Image: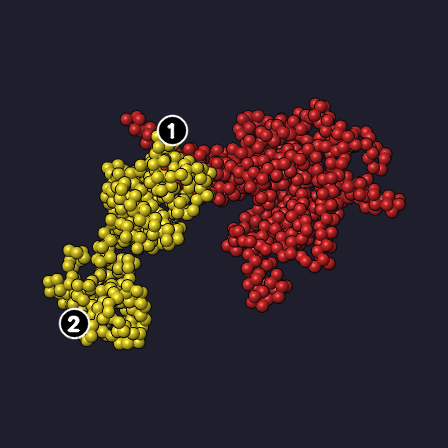
Chain colours: A yellow, B red
Amino acid sequence: MSRVRLQNVSKTFGTTTAVKELNLTIREGEFFTFLGPSGCGKTTTLRMIAGFYYPAEGRIWFDNRDVTEVPPQKRNTGMVFQNYALFPHMTVHENVAFGLEVRKISKKEIRERVKKALEQVRLAGYSDRRIAQLSGGQQQRVALARSLVIRPGILLLDEPLSNLDARLRDEMRSEILSLQRSLGITTIYVTHDQTEALSMSDRIAVFNQGVCQQVGTPEEVYNAPRNAFVASFVGETNLFPATVAQVSGETVTVQSKDHTFRIRHKQEESGFSVEPGNRLFLTIRPEGVDLVPEAGENTLSAKMELVQFMGTSFHCAARLEDGTPLKAMFVNRPDLMGRLREGDRVIFRFPEDRLRLIPGGDDRA
Amino acid sequence: MLNRLLKRGWDWFQTDRVFTWVLLLPVVAVLFSYVFYPEFRTLVESVWVNGTFSLKNYRLFFNPESLANLEALWNSVYISILSVFLSALIGVPLAFIFNRYEFPGRRFFASAAIMPIVLPSLVGVMSFLFLYGESGLVTRSIQDLFGLEEPPFKLSGVSGILLVHAYTMYVYFYMTVSSAVRGLNPALEEAATNLGAGSWTVFRRVTLPLLTPALVAASLLVFMTSMASFSAPFLLAGGFRVLSLQIYFSKINGNLDMAATQSVILSVISISFLLLMRWYQGRRDYRMMEKGVGTHRREVRNPWVKWPLVATGVFGVIILLLPHATLFLLSLVPEGTWTYQTYPTTFSFENYILLMKDPTIWEPVRNSLLMATVATAGNFLFGIFASYVLVKRRFRGKNLLDILVMLPWALPATVVAMNMILAFNVPTPFTFGHVLVGTFWILPLAYFIRHIPLVVRSTNAALEQLDDSLEEAARNLGARWTTTFRRVILPVIMPGIMAGTLLAFVTAVGEFVSSVMLYTIDNRPISIEIMNQLRMFNLGQAAAYAVYQIILIAGVLWISQRFFGVKAQNTL
Ligand SMILES: Nc1ncnc2c1ncn2[C@@H]1O[C@H](COP(=O)(O)OP(=O)(O)O)[C@@H](O)[C@H]1O
Ligand SMILES: [Mg+2]
């Protein structure tokens, strides 16, 4: 199992910069996810780690070995491709055995290891099947077995579930996770699906336009987004431009939408300090919003436009007096019955411990 | 220390960029020596008169006083244009009828319609002469039937050439349009109908625009083939001049300067068409061509339409297969048994037996097989590497390399042969200091050059199907490039390569045009021997050789289709 370190890595294709000045350390045995919208450079980064692209600048380290220019076949990484890339002219067994054969491992050992790998992915008994005779989920498992059987230092997965239907996706998600946990293998997982990222990862790196925006545990990324992009890409959120009015210790007062809000702001947690006059974003997750009977501190009045009852919760879309949309979510409780009606005027409260400040309001305010 | 350095060096060697160049080097070397350099020599020959640069030859060509060359150029062009129209006139309706309607015998007719492609060019023309020439079987039958004094018609001149061209080249239209019609999503036409368009409007506004790429491609193909056509004018033209034939005559008369000039002019036309075609296919929108669309054929119920359709089909197939049948029939006529009689009377397998027994009759077959084998082995190896770098590697100048690969396909065989004569009649480094003209090796080399595009293209098609991630997966699992290539890439693309290579092989066996320009007594191939037998009026033996070639080609096409899953239209 290896630790992976990317040091100031950049990659350009012609004039487009796919990855820019990336610094990352992936710890031994960790389940690490690259999350970001399509085209943000996740695959490019993964392929640099696998050795299919060489960085234009920067170095890549596996433990203390500089692998920046090492050809892919000498990196001992196991990669699962988005389309699986199973060899169509070989059987399941031959596919899984391929990596062992090129390592010149004895026939007997190959047979044992392939058998074990196929058992691990619950495909024992399928070894003589042709690839074309397998379903999508089974092909996925063969691809997984093929990359695990070589005992790679790092497992690389590029959107492995995107070709599966919704049900299989859930099933494979937990299967991959339990395999990873039991083997303790360093894993890098690429996805654009935030649910996958949040539910599987030890840590997540959020990418946008070739730049890594934030690295952190799922809770950190969700609860303490570093910037507006992370806040809106990971989960749903409300973002309002705001101006700092007053700072006293951890309590900050900001002006937004002609209202004044009080917020708890910890510099060590968010990574930046605020001063009066700063322009920034005020953000609150839909589930942080409260419904109150009358106006008070940190409250706003709004008109309820759409209420969707989802069973466990109500998803509401409202509009503030100045026309700004607001999303709110309430867990289903008996006291809410009949209180959420479309077209009603309601008063929302933003609790000060649920509000967060995010830098970067300058360009929007 | 040294070990470390060596290992560094090896790693560097294996980096992608360097490795691309390592693969590229032999490919570029071959193309430069055998494609570019000969063409360049011809150009030099045409402008280098008595040791100085001069355009004298070109002035001679375009001399308004002696119109021979200009006339030949004009004839070539208008024959080609007419060939395009005639071929389209036959091929396009057939493609529609066989792909849109269901009627008894449709599948049989549809496959019979591609039968002209199993006839090598010389053999095709020969069979037409046997049928419709002055003393052809059909000509004589009609003469007898109506008791005419004179033969009612004879196959010769422009009409003869056009007839042969239409017969052999409509297949291009038939195949390209058929595959376009099959790729056309019927929902599009249904959508237009649903929106209220009448059937003529649907055809004009929806179907035709979608078929335009296929029609343009086929037209260009027929035009080029027809410009290059040699066998038909060679046997039928009489005094009629076409450019490809003029080159041959200039060469025979020892006027190499003029032959070079004519070659350059024909090259310019062909290369322009090649570039035009590449440009057109580049801008062609493939998105409309959906895969796996189920075309539903309309069943023809009305008996007044159905049976005439079937009758026309049967009649058409008879006409189409008449040349094949005639060749087979005549191949059974022993030498000297058909002299003054109207029709042959004696039939036996003597010609085939002689083929196996008589060494002088067997020798041309052996020569052809040997030379085709050598050439095709070269094509196989070269095709794999050239195609791999072209499809899977990125480098500067790729477009140029691609054009160079396609050049021997675009250039008429006469020109390719002329280029070789002018390049290799002196010792060159590319021929290891030997003169090739007049030796055994000139023909295998010519066959090799001629078939570079065919093998590379069919291999390209197979490689383009191969997802890049397959190669990456193998390398990720620890395989070196050589292992990856041997165990993953090669097995997957083998069917495509084999199909192209086999086709190159049979075409080389039947190759006439470059053979007639380059052969020597020692390496006389089948096609030359067919000509000799024709000159000696031994039609039976000539036909037996022809049948032998047809069986070889048909066999290969069948194998490709059956075992390599390659559709006949992909081989064009
Ligand atoms: N081989 C390539 N050639 C040119 N551009 C590329 C190549 N691979 C990726 N790119 C570009 O780099 C950017 C990042 O792509 P990628 O890493 O594939 O994104 P994703 O996050 O969706 O995996 C995109 O703008 C893409 O167009
Ligand atoms: Mg991607």
Residue for badge 2: A297
Q: Residue A332 carries which label?
A: none
Q: Is residue B391 above or below residue B210?
A: above
Pointer 1 residue: A107
**In this view of the protein, which residue sits in the foreground, B404 or A172?**
A172
Q: Helix or strand or loop: what does disc 1 sit on?
A: helix
Mark 1 nearby-residue class (10 Å; few <14, some 14–19, many ≥20): few
The answer to whether one can see residue A75 in this image is no
What residue lies at 77% left-to-right and 39% top-to-bottom?
Answer: B130
Q: Is residue A95 left or right of residue B80?
A: left
Disc 2 is placed on an element classified as loop
Q: Earlier in the sequence, mark 2 or mark 1?
A: 1
| Residue B104 appears in view | yes
- Quarter holding the N terminus of chain A is top left
Ligand 2 under 8 Å from disc 1 Cβ: no
Query: How would you rate the neighbour count of disc 2 (Cα within 10 Å): few for under 14, some for 14-19, many for 20 or more?
Result: some
Amino acid type of the residue tagged 2 in the rendering? Glu
Q: Which residue is drawn at 32% across and 31% down?
A: B8
* Residue B52 x/y as whole percent: 59, 36
Q: Give the chain letter at badge 2.
A: A
Badge 1 amino acid? Lys
**B83 relative to A109, above or below:** below
In what quadrant of the picture does the C terminus of chain A appear?
Answer: bottom left
